[in-house]
Amino acid sequence: MEIIKEMPVSKGSLGYLPRGFELTPAQLARIQYKNDEIKDKFIKYNALKKRQSESRQNIIIANAIEDIGGISERELKLIGIALYWAEGYKGTACSGVELTNADSAMIKLMMRWFRQICGV
């Protein structure tokens, strides 16, 4: 971009100019410094976006947990049926009720469903 400011040529034309030119160690070091500077800005920008995303996600999770605490018995019944349909084991070798999920909140909700709705 610095060359474009100094020379009135298009970016496309500029792509052909460096061929055949040897850069000095100082020029190469400056290019490396600029690349590192851009990379650092990119890393900081991504870290900021990640923090913002995590913050929004935490708010959504907190709201969902609050909402789940206030669900009706009918809603709990429907949620449990849907979760068992999606996550429950229904094979012929199954001698009981099985649910596979690594999310602790999901397991707590299913345990609530088993206790309140199924009477387990």
Image (cartoon, grey):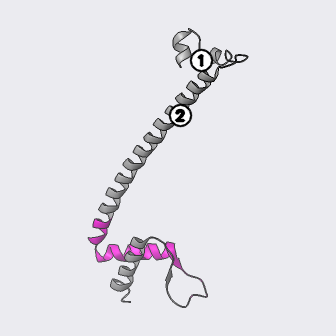
Q: Where is residue 1 in the image (x, y as percent from the top left)?
A: 53, 20
Give the magenta-colored segment's residue range: 65-94
Q: In which quarter of the image is residue 9?
A: top right
Label 1: which secondary element: helix
Question: Residue 73 versus residue 65: which sits nearer the camera?
Answer: 65
Label 2: which secondary element: helix
Is 17 situated left or right of 59 in this image?
A: right
In reply to whether residue 106 is colored magenta, the answer given is no
Bin the neighbour count of mark 2 within 10 Å (Cα to Cα): few under 14, some 14-19, many 20 and up: few
Quadrant showing the C terminus: bottom left
Outermost right residue: 20
Q: Position of residue 68 (x, y in %)?
A: 31, 69
Main secondary structure of the magenta stretch:
helix
The numbered dot on residue 11 is 1
Q: What residue type is labelled 2?
A: Asp
Which residue position holds label 2? 36
Residue at 30% in and 61% down: 63
Outermost left residue: 70
From what the image shows, is residue 110 above or below residue 118?
above
Bin the neighbour count of mark 1 within 10 Å (Cα to Cα): few under 14, some 14-19, many 20 and up: few
Q: Position of residue 6 (x, y in %)?
A: 53, 10
